[in-house]
């Protein structure tokens, strides 16, 4: 239905309007316009329906975010109530609102360690930009303004603003819209399957951590402000660090008195079976960025949780912090996030991921897909997983990146009722946290069909997959 005149709108008309006016994110617009966008009309639980009536199981929870699933009326009711009472006011001029204040309190309670102060923004990218400014400001008030270098990892995604792009390690993004923000350095990612060169996972973990120390010494320890990393690299293909990696990283950060930042935009709010990925990997960060699962995608909201060391210095010595957004702590978004946290807590969604559905997904992926000739390696924890598509799994031989085999597989998925994302030649899954075991079985059935179809497509192109 048309939201203005309530008259039905044909799918072809929507596609034509979309092509005429809508610039999509991370999209080749000309290619999309030639093909036409798929129109998603409604959703319930873990399922989507498009305008042609096709039911699709959402193996990506939107964009890693719809943790409590679609169609939770409670969140809509809370949003309506808050809109009627106070649809908006800012938190700039010595004012606050009850939803923003209560949400800050709840987040301080569920975050690990001494992350007792919360700064609100609207997206993960904005949270990362906030961290860049906050970390550099911290070192200024501590009398070391030269400590500005931020270190992250190759193939890491930390948002698409100029700050987030610069901090992230996505080479394709760095090639567009430069120059990047100065003072950003990158080290190797802990991608054991693709880059270990014969080392054991434990050996490779130490090698990757040592790369951080080498970079610190290269740029000068007293110039480095912080190391930033996702507990599990999400958009990089669900790169799960090998055992010992995070312990070694933390030891190096403490050795050189460098702030440790955990980007929890994807891992936060139950994805790994704990409230935060930092708890799953025993990371003790000085700051955390969060978004996505904070409201389960029902409203745009993000936050930075700030540990006592940084917060106390900024409060006592920093004066006014010239940073923020019109919608920081938006009362409707905050109210919806509060209700989302209540559901996660009272329905024990995170415990279910930790104890039941998370282990089941990981087991079923390995048992049912791990032997497929196209699947070289599966990794993940909780309800997040990544699969490397290999041309010869016995030798770890990956496909030429120019082939874009991941996109071939993704397109088969989308045509067969499954959303499974391609990150290069890796397929990734991150379904809603409320997915049942029966729905996991359905998801894997569809994934297996699409892997078979991908092998057939490759054969039609004259490309053989080793059996």
Image (cartoon, rainbow, N blue to C red):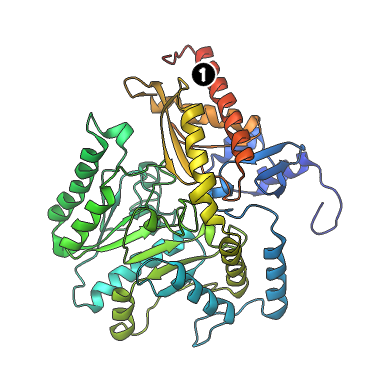
Q: Residues within 10 Å of mark 1 (few under 14, many from 20)?
A: many
Q: Quadrant of residue 56?
A: top right
Q: Is residue 53 left or right of residue 126?
A: right
Closer to the camera in the image, 53 or 325: 53
Q: Residue at x 40, y 43 (%)?
A: 236
Q: Residue at x 47, y 52 (%)?
A: 273
What residue is pinned by disc 1? 455
Picture quarter with the C terminus:
top left
Vertical placement of 394 versus 286: above or below?
A: above
In the rendered image, residue 167, in percent from the top left (x then y), is placed at: 34, 55
Say whether residue 146 is visible: yes
Vertical placement of 416 versus 53: above or below?
A: above
Q: Residue at x 55, y 49 (%)?
A: 63
Q: Residue at x 37, y 79 (%)?
A: 321
Q: Quadrant of residue 235?
A: top left
Closer to the camera in the image, 366 or 32: 366
Vertical placement of 231 versus 110: above or below?
A: above
The mark total stands at 1
In the rendered image, residue 192, in percent from the top left (x then y), is placed at: 30, 36
SS at badge 1:
helix
Closer to the camera in the image, 24 or 226: 226
In the rendered image, residue 380, in percent from the top left (x then y), is placed at: 42, 41
The residue lying furthest to the bottom in this view is: 94
Q: Is residue 60 left or right of residue 134?
A: right
Say whether residue 37 is visible: no
In the rendered image, residue 254, in percent from the top left (x then y), is placed at: 20, 62
């Amino acid at each position: 239905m048309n939201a203005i005149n309530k008259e039905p709108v044909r799918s072809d008309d929507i596609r034509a309007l979309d092509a005429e006016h809508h610039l999509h994110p991370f999209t080749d617009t000309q290619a999309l316009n030639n093909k036409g966008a798929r129109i998603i009309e409604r959703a319930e639980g873990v399922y989507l329906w498009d305008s042609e009536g096709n039911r699709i199981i959402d193996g990506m929870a939107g964009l890693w975010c719809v943790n409590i699933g679609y169609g939770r009326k409670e969140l809509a009711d809370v949003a309506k109530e808050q809109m009627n009472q106070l649809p908006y006011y800012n938190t700039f001029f010595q004012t606050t609102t009850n939803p923003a204040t209560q949400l800050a309190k709840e987040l301080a309670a569920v975050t690990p360690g001494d992350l007792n102060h919360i700064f609100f923004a609207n997206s993960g990218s904005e949270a990362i930009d906030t961290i860049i400014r906050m970390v550099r400001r911290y070192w200024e008030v501590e009398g070391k303004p030269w400590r500005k270098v931020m270190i992250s990892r190759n193939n890491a995604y930390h948002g698409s603003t100029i700050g987030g792009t610069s901090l992230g390690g996505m080479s394709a993004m760095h090639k567009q819209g430069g120059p990047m923000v100065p003072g950003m350095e990158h080290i190797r990612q802990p991608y054991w399957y693709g880059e270990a060169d014969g080392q054991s996972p434990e050996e490779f973990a130490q090698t990757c951590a040592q790369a951080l120390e080498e970079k610190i010494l290269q740029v000068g320890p007293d110039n480095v402000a912080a190391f930033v990393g996702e507990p599990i690299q999400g958009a990089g293909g669900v790169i799960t660090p090998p055992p010992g990696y995070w312990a070694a990283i933390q030891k190096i950060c403490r050795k050189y008195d460098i702030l440790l930042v955990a980007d929890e935009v994807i891992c936060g709010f139950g994805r790994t079976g704990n409230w935060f990925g930092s708890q799953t990997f025993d990371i003790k960060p000085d700051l955390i960025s969060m978004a996505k699962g904070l409201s389960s995608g029902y409203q745009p909201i993000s936050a930075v949780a700030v540990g006592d060391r940084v917060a106390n210095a900024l409060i006592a010595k920093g004066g006014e912090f010239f940073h923020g957004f019109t919608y920081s702590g938006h009362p409707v978004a905050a109210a919806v996030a509060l209700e989302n946290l209540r559901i996660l807590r009272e329905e024990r969604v995170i415990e279910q991921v930790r104890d039941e559905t998370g282990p089941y997904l990981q087991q079923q992926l390995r048992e049912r897909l791990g032997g497929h000739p196209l699947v070289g390696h599966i990794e993940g924890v909780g309800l997040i997983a990544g699969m490397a598509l290999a041309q010869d799994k016995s030798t770890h031989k990956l496909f030429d990146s120019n082939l874009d085999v991941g996109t071939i597989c993704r397109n088969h998925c989308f045509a067969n009722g499954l959303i499974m994302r391609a990150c290069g030649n890796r397929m990734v899954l991150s379904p809603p946290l409320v997915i049942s075991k029966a729905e996991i079985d359905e998801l894997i059935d569809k994934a297996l069909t699409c892997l078979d179809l991908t092998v057939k497509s490759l054969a039609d192109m004259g490309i053989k997959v080793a059996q």
